[in-house]
Image (spheres, helix red, strand yellow):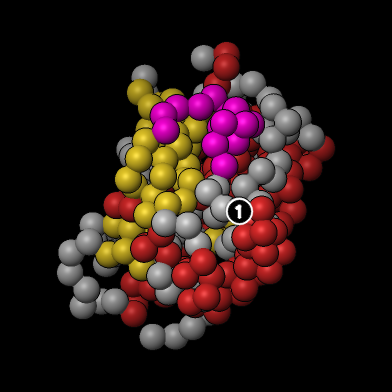
Amino acid sequence: MEEYLKETKMLNFNSAKISDLVREKGWLELDEFHKIKNIYEFVQNDILFGYNSTDILSAVEVLQDGFGQCNTKATLLMALLRSVNIPCRLHAFNVSKDFQKGALPQIIYLLAPKYILHTWVEVFFNDKWIALEGVIIDKNYLYTVQQKYTEHKGIFKKFAIATKDVETVNIDWTGNDVFIQKEAVVDDYGIFSSPDILFSKHTQNMSKIKLYLYSHIGTKMMTKRVFKIRNSKK
């Protein structure tokens, strides 16, 4: 399990900011189940769902932003889990962009690549690997979407959510797999011990111009939109 506990440039959990946070929250004093639970809930809800300027932020940079999406929340979650000696790894995929409808401004959605690089964290607990994809969407955002679609039946793929049943989906940590975007998966890139290794091999499929516009303009528009959705009423 040593490779799933290592610090890396992106998983910089020995930094002062993360060490101070872990000490302040008292996570080291908890049993294994509650270490995972409390860290998972922190990244899920204290770090709001939003779009960072790049996938390759370090854990400290994600913490400083205070919001994140699948790949950046995964980095922070991994760093915090490893800081309390919980082994974790990264599972990478391509997802279809259609589940982002509603969460993205129309122009950005049209310019986005057909497939998007997506990750979730897997934690080693009770002698097995468990997926923690549910960390991506904060509960307030999910609740707002659920209130708008109380009549929806079947697979739901909108507003950055891709699940079999949006009304009943459970994103709490219970010791089992938890998903929120799984139904958008189309390709499996496999397992990586760190985001550093993943992003040295795979990146978002965008031209340099599109990537620049996405990083400097698009992500700000996207984050503003999801924050507006979160604060909207039924």
* Residue 164 drawn in magenta: no
What percent of the width, then of the height, locates residue 140?
47, 68
Residue 190 lies, with reference to residue 153, above or below; the image says: above
Which residue in the rendered view is the most extreme toward the right? 16
Q: As drawn, is 196 to the left or to the right of 141?
A: right
Where are the magenta residues, as a range? 189-203
The C terminus appears in which quarter of the rendering? bottom left
Can residue 154 be seen in this snapshot? yes
Viewer-closest of 11 and 208: 208
Mark 1: secondary structure: loop
| Residue at x 41%, y 45% (from the top left corner) | 94
Which residue in the rendered view is the most extreme toward the bottom? 234
What percent of the width, then of the height, locates residue 15?
79, 35
What percent of the width, then of the height, locates residue 184?
33, 53
Viewer-closest of 230 and 172: 230
Write down the quadrant of residue 25 in the picture. top right
| Residue at x 41%, y 29% (from the top left corner) | 190
Residue 130 lies, with reference to residue 62, above or below; the image says: above
Which residue in the rendered view is the most extreme toward the top? 2
Can residue 172 be seen in this snapshot? no
Q: From the image, tell me which residue sits under label 1.
A: 207
- Three-letter residue code for mark 1: Ser
